[in-house]
Image (tube, rainbow, N blue to C red):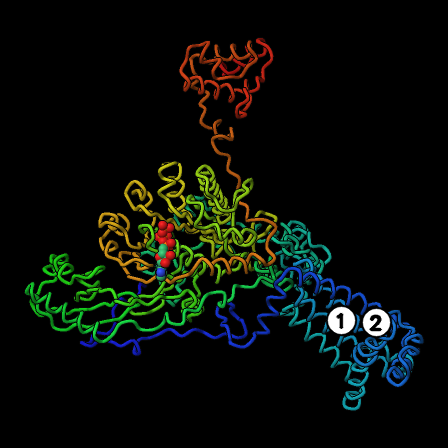
Amino acid sequence: MAQPTTSPRQNTIRRPAERNEPRPRVNRDGGSSSGRFKTPSFNWGAALDRWLTDQRSALTLGMLLMGLALGLMVAFISYIINGPADQSVVGAAFSEPLAETGTETRNWVGLVGAYVAQAFVFRWFGVGALAIPVIVFLSGYKLTFGSELVPLSRATKALLFAAVWSSLMLGYIVLVTDSAQTASVWCGGIGYEVNVALYSLFGWGNLAFIGFLLFFFVVYFFDVRNIRLPDFSHSTQPRAKIRSDDPLQTYAESELEPEADDEIEPDDEEEHQPFSPQSQPVNSFVSDAVTPDEQPIPATSLPEVIAQTTGVTLTIKNRDTTINNGADTEELSAVPAPTFEPDPFEEDDLVATHGLYDPTLDLPQYQYPLSDLLTDYPNSRKAQVSDDELTANKEKIENTLRNFGIEIDSIQASIGPTVTLYEIIPAKGVRISKIKSLEDDIALSLSALGIRIIAPMPGMGTIGIEVPNKNREMVSMRSVITSDVFNNSKFDLPIVLGKTISNEIYVADLAKMPHLLMAGATGQGKSVGLNVLLTSLIYKKHPSQLKLVLVDPKKVELTLFNKLERHFLAKLPDSEEPIITDTKKVVNTLNSLCIEMDNRYNLLKDAGCRNLKEYNAKFVKRRLNPEKGHRFLPYIVLIIDELADLMMTAGKEVEQPIARLAQLARAIGIHLVVATQRPSVNVITGLIKANFPARLSFKVTSKIDSRTILDTGGAEQLVGMGDMLLSSNSDIVRLQCPFVDTNEIEDICEFVGNQRGYDDAYALPEFVGDDGGQGDDKDVDMANRDPMFDEAARLIVIHQQGSTSLIQRKLKLGYNRAGRLVDQLEAARIVGAFEGSKARDVLVQDLQTLEDILKRLKGE
Ligand SMILES: Nc1ncnc2c1ncn2[C@@H]1O[C@H](COP(=O)(O)OP(=O)(O)OP(=O)(O)O)[C@@H](O)[C@H]1O
């Protein structure tokens, strides 16, 4: 729902102190890093975070831990073998000279090894202590290589349990066999002492206790919920058998071999697949056999999927929830989802074994940018409107209206960051249409720049007059990024657009907008607005969840974001630069996004999902098989800074893919933000406009421009510097855009860019444009060959020269016709593909072969 632009009606002037000022959230534990606040004292946690984020420190620490693990393992094994001999040496370590005791120790890692091993092995866990170096090694591996050999947290839990449990079990055996003198090194102090204590209480019952402990662990660790007894009934229904030792066992096999019982065993081997960035954890999913993909999926065609998704967005539009502030709204649809229920045992088994799929593990150490990268403008929150100013404006409004014969009942002011809204209730009998018709005269009489009259206020029966404040408040990016509204927002793509007239922080969901058109004359805050939008997304999203395609024909506005290449940016496979500035590349990129869209629709169709959210949720629950091409789909946000340039140089070539994406891409997580300085009808064409329901306008130069972008006047009355109007679902809200400086953007990009990223930018699908040759084949209609085709072919073969100009000259044809003929010759494989300035290869060597080809073509 759009933000209220009014406050409760009273004939009063509200002071800033009464306003609902948002308070910054102080979050010291870093649960959401975007909410962290700089404290005056040195922040050790943040310093450590930063140190660890530095790839060099992670690598050093990782190698150190792996070395340490190796040392510990050698020391422990050596202690288990030579332990008794070393016990007295360790005991004497601090009473005798170190040099002497050191030479006497038998441990392979010397006195230190003996000392540490004595603690871990002899005093605590016995042989179970061997689990400790394994944990240390796995942690070191993760830090060094940025991926997990096995899921670290689960492995740590299992290994710690194994250490304690084996100590208890062996302790029991040592106790009952009375072999403490010789074998206590096996169980360690913990296992032995606990058993001694429990034995006095339970006697043989100890074993039951230890057994129960194991049962308890297995139930919780593997999420076992029931124990199935063998089914002795003569059911003909075969059951799937999933075995840990044969992960590739197929459904088909299990159907051929009906099993009487279900064996659901965790498959630990599957966990050994390293998880490399941008790769999918193929082995952590079941094979074709046990994937739900084998379940019958109701046939859903691509148009149906699109129709269903269109249903989703239409519902949102009508529900007036495109823009929302604070409350999260679910995407709902009246269209029933195709049913797709996999076998719950398989799903449970996979999730129990591997946990839910976590895309952020692509870059497990990624740190969200901290709020202290943003500048704190201490004065930015101060109220800027004095009592005198308020009273003077109020009187001026009353007098002006009276001059036009309009009496008013009450007037109420709400002070916003840039303008103050005076809300007027006209006296009985005054028709609002009269005020509306006098709009320009009233504005003139009030003689202030940037007055906007809203008559009537939507849904209110009052009239709003917005008067700019003499001293405006600057809304800093930091103040909005640290606000609760933004931090607690559960939106998919939250963007903080600024402050409303009633000083509320306005957060919208780009995913629900679902695309945004931005306009504004030069110097009115468009670039800052785009930076604000990008900053919001970067503060809230992990690189695995969001990819940005940045198009910057002006070549200077978005260059700072270059540093995010290996984290957030997406580009065509063959392009060097992640930020697209060249028009030809823009066309290719837009078409590539259309291919990505089609690919994503196919994946959704295959998975039986209606939109990206459902699809990713299913993937996270490991119900989609990566071996069948399924992958976690990040949101893609395409930003075009300056559409006018592109429309002038490429026209339809950019208009069509933009319109296509805008029409269809919302459901598959591709969202467009298109900005322009020139909101004229030849830039913002009807086709583009119709597909961008959410539009944002900074100050424009004329009422016509305002109408082009917002369908109504008003944007020409704005006061600049980030003062803007947001139109969505025919609601118009005036907002003050936050300010973020290029230095701040630079710091944020540096902070993110210095962290370990993917190997390369996110690769968009390849698109072969007109000059690539392949695209031309499609357009060549061989059934309608040029009447001169045969002649041209003979000419080419006789001269063994594949050139258009040869055909032009010899056959006396125009360039276009000769070009078409060459295209047809290429399609018939008589000449080769276009190779720039070189003549094309002639693929047919003699006339006889050519005549055969011509005959064949005629026979078709
Ligand atoms: N939200 C804001 N708060 C305060 N000042 C702002 C804000 N937005 C912009 N400004 C001021 O306006 C100047 C111009 O802004 P910006 O560069 O975003 O304009 P622009 O519309 O992108 O211009 P162009 O199209 O020529 O690039 C900024 O340098 C800044 O001083």
- Secondary structure under tag 2 reads helix
Residue at 64% across, 54% down: 276
Q: Which residue is mark 1?
A: 132
Amino acid at pointer 1: Ile
Can you give x and y, in whole percent of width and height, for residue 333 in the image? 38, 57
Measure the C-alpha gap from mark 1 to mark 2.
10 Å
Viewer-side residue, 665 vs 452? 452
Outermost residue toward the bottom in this view: 200
The amino acid pointed to by label 2 is Phe
Q: At 47% across and 27% down in the image, what residue appears? A: 776
Give the x, y percent position of residue 673: 39, 51
Q: Measuring 55% from the left and 10% from the top, which residue is drawn there? A: 799
Query: Does the rendering let one see residue 826?
Result: yes
Image position of 255 (left or right of 476):
right
Report the front residue among 849 and 836: 836
Secondary structure of residue under mark 1: helix
Dot 2 beta carbon under 8 Å from ligand 1: no
Task: Give the number of the disc on residue 76.
Answer: 2
Left or right: where does residue 735 sit relative to residue 90? left
Kindly tell me whether mark 1's CB lies below 8 Å from ligand 1: no
User: Is 392 above or below relative to 269?
Assistant: below
